[in-house]
Image (cartoon, helix red, strand yellow):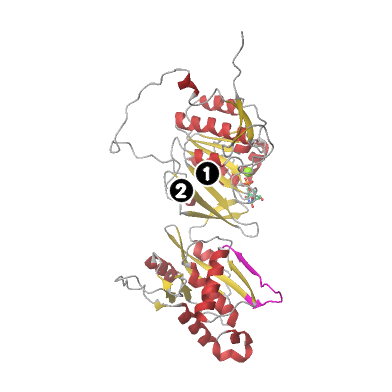
Amino acid sequence: MFMVRSRTSFVCQSCGAVSQRWQGKCEACGGWNTISEETAGAGIGAQAARGTKGKPFPLEGLNGVSAAAPRIVSGIAELDRVTGGGFVPGSILLMGGEPGIGKSTLLIQTCAALARAGSRVVYISGEEAVAQVRMRAARLALADAPVELAAETHVEDILATLAQGPRPALVVIDSIQTMFTDSVESAPGTVTQVRASAQALIRFAKTSGSAVVLVGHVTKDGQVAGPRVVEHMVDAVLSFEGDGAHHFRMLRASKNRFGPTDEIGVFEMTGAGLAEIANPSALFLAGREAGAPGAAVLAGMEGSRPMLLEVQALVSPSALGTPRRAVVGWDSQRLSMVLAVLEAHAGVRLGQHDVYLSIAGGLRINEPAADLAAAAALVSSLTGTPLPADCCYFGEIGLSGAVRPVIHTGLRLKEAAKLGFHRAVLPPPPGESREAPPEGMRLARATHIAALVADIAAAGSAHEEARPALRALK
Ligand code: TYD
Ligand code: MG
C-alpha cells in the first residue's frame, strides 16, 4: 500500500509566481519573505477534481431594485467627502499612511464622533496599549465618548468578541500589520498573515454589515506594506499624506467602489488633534510673500473643489556641469516638459541654470492646469520680475507651446474672486463657451507660452539694470 503524496509548490503571496523551491526573495516581483509553501491538492479546482458538486444559484439582471447604500456619516466633513458621503455598512476600507502622520488620531476622532452620535463603535489597537489610546483620547477631549476599546492582535479573538452584543456600525483595526490569525502558520507581520487576517476581517464586514477600517503602514515608496493584494481585496483605499515640516494633512482616495477618487480632505494637525480645513485656499495662500519674484498662484482643482495654491520657483545660474532640477509637490517629468517648451518656443534658456520648483504648503498636485502657473513662476524667477499679487494662472501647455483649455474654468475663477484676486491668465475658451467672468475679475487669455513670457519680461524690463538675469531671455 502506498499513499499519494500531495504535491507542494512554493507560491509568492504577493505576486502569485510559482517557484520550485523556497527562496527568501521572489524572483518575479522582488518581494522578500513572500514565498510560502502551498499544497497543490488544495484550493479552487481541487474540489471539482474530486467530484464535489456546486449548488446552482439564480442569476439576476442589471436593473433590479437594490436599496441605495445607506451611509454611516461621521460628521467630519473632510472625511465624509473623501469616502463619498460616509462609510458604507458592510464595506471595508484601508487607510494607509506613513507612521506618525495621524491615522490613529483621525480614526479615534472619527470613532468618538460616531459613538457620541449613538452608534456602536469598536476600536481595536494592535500597536498601542489601552492606556496609550486613552491618554490620546483624553488629550483630544474625547474620553467621554462611548467608544469600545481593546488592545488585541489575535483575529479569532477579535471576531469572537465582535460577535457578542449588537452589530457595531464601525470597527477600526489599527493596524492590519499587527494582526495574526491561527488559520495560517506564518509569523505575525508576514505577508501571508496580513493577507489572511485581512481576508477574515473582510468576511466579517460582509457578513455582519459593519463597516471595517483597516489601518495600513506604507513603505518609503508610498505603498501599503504587505501584499498589494490587500488593496485589491478592500472596497476603498484612502491614503493620509503630508510631510513632517507642515501641519497640513491630505486625505485622498486612490480607490473607492462607492464614491469618487479625486476628492481630497484637508486637515491641520493641531495640539488638539486634527482640525478640518473647510477653506484650504485661504490656508495655502496664508503667509504668501506677494511681490517676491518666482511665485505664481495656481487656480487649481482638487476633485470637485477649486483650490488656490502658490507655485514657487527658484532659477539660478548653475555652478555644475549638469544643472540641478528639483521638484517638490509636482511631477518632475512635467517640469522637464515645461522647461523644454519654454526653451524651444519662447527662447527661455535654462540649460545653465539650476531649477527648483515647489508647491507651497506641502500639497501634491498632478493636474495639467498647473503648467501655466509653473511657467509663470519660472520666468518670474529667472527675470527677477514679481508677478502681480492679485493675478492667478491656470492652463495646460502643449508641446507646441500652445496653451490648452482645462476644465472647470468657472469654478476656478469664482474661487479666485472670492479670495480677492482681480486678474487671471488662462487659456482661450474652448469652442463657443464664453462665460462672463465673476465681477471685478479681468481675464487675460494666453494662447501661446511666448505671449506669457513676453508679458512678464515686459513688466520687468524697467528694472533691467538691476536684473542681469533678464539677458537670458532673447
Ligand atoms: P498618530 O495618529 O499616532 O499617527 P499614526 O497613527 O499615523 O502613526 O499621530 C502621531 C503624531 O501626531 C505625533 O507625532 C503627535 C501628533 N499629534 C499632534 O500633533 N496633536 C495631537 O493632538 C495628537 C493626538 C497627535
Ligand atoms: Mg497609529
Q: Residue furthest right?
A: 319
User: Would you say the residues marked 1 and 2 are in contact, meaning their CB atoms lie under 8 Å apart?
Assistant: no
**Left or right, 208 with reference to 1:** left
Q: Which residue is mark 1?
A: 110
Q: Who is closer to the viewer here, 172 or 112?
A: 172
Say the numbered circle drawn on residue 359. none
Three-letter code, disc 2: Asp
What's the magenta region?
A: 315-330
Q: Secondary structure at mark 2?
A: helix
Of badges 1 and 2, the one in the foreground is: 2
Q: Is residue 428 magenta?
A: no
Q: Position of residue 102 (x, y in %)?
A: 60, 49
Q: Is residue 323 magenta?
A: yes
Query: Does 303 sit above or below residue 462?
Result: above
Instruction: Name which residue lies at 51% across and 80% down.
Output: 346
Q: Position of residue 253 (x, y in %)?
A: 49, 49
Q: Position of residue 271 (x, y in %)?
A: 63, 53
Say the numbered circle drawn on residue 80. 2
Instruction: Name which residue lies at 53% across and 42% down.
Output: 231
Q: Who is closer to the viewer here, 62 or 172?
A: 62
Q: Who is closer to the viewer here, 223 or 103?
A: 223
Quadrant location of the N terminus in the rendered image:
top right
Query: Does 402 sit above or below residue 249?
Result: below
Instruction: Name which residue lies at 48% across and 18% down.
Output: 50
Q: Residues within 10 Å of mark 1 (few under 14, many from 20)?
A: many
- Label 1 – label 2 distance at C-alpha: 10 Å
Three-letter code, disc 1: Thr
Q: Is residue 291 visible?
A: no
Quadrant location of the C terminus in the rendered image:
bottom right
Q: Residue furthest top?
A: 1
